[in-house]
Amino acid sequence: MPANLHVRNVPDEIARRIKVRAVQNGRSAEAEHRAALEQVFGGVGKEEWLRRADALRASILARRGGELLPSSVDLIREDRDKR
């Protein structure tokens, strides 16, 4: 069941900016509040994020024949050694 939220003491500048953003996005201020909350809290949880990161890592390894990408530290050292 959806909840109703009431926020007190919102700084004037924040209230103004959310109204401007609502107009820019063609929606009401209330809809903009919901969109902002969804953007901050509606993303995937930590477990899902880790699962996706693992899947991406496995995909990269598969494309590279099981070979890891070189670390940035190794690449920088290699570049310095060439000088």
Image: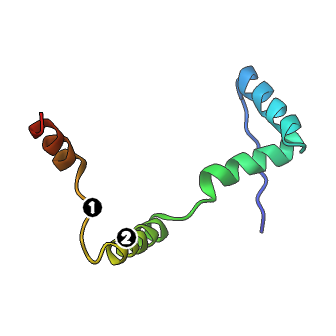
Towards the viewer: 23 or 57: 57
Q: Name the residue rendered at 14%, 36% in the picture.
A: 80
Return the residue at label 1: 69
Q: Is residue 80 above or below residue 39?
A: above
Q: Position of residue 60 (x, y in %)?
A: 37, 70
Mark 1 or 2, nearer chain start: 2
Q: Name the residue rendered at 80%, 25% in the picture.
A: 16
Q: Name the residue rendered at 19%, 45% in the picture.
A: 73
Which corner quadrant of the image does residue 56 belong to? Answer: bottom left
Q: Position of residue 59 (x, y in %)?
A: 40, 74
Q: Secondary structure at mark 2?
A: helix
Q: Amino acid at mark 1?
A: Leu
Q: Is residue 7 above or below residue 2?
A: above
Return the residue at label 2: 60
Q: Amino acid at mark 2?
A: Ile
Q: Is residue 57 above or below residue 77?
A: below
Q: Would you call the spot at circle 2 few (<14 residues within 10 Å), some (14-19), or many (20 or more)?
A: some
Which corner quadrant of the image does residue 23 belong to? Answer: top right
* Residue 5 appears in the figure: no
| Mark 1 touches mark 2? (CB < 8 Å) | yes
Q: Position of residue 44 (x, y in %)?
A: 55, 64
Q: Is residue 57 left or right of residue 47?
A: left
Q: Is residue 60 above or below residue 31?
A: below
Q: Quadrant of the N terminus?
A: bottom right
Q: Quadrant of the C terminus?
A: top left
* Residue 81 appears in the figure: yes
Q: Name the residue rendered at 85%, 45% in the picture.
A: 30
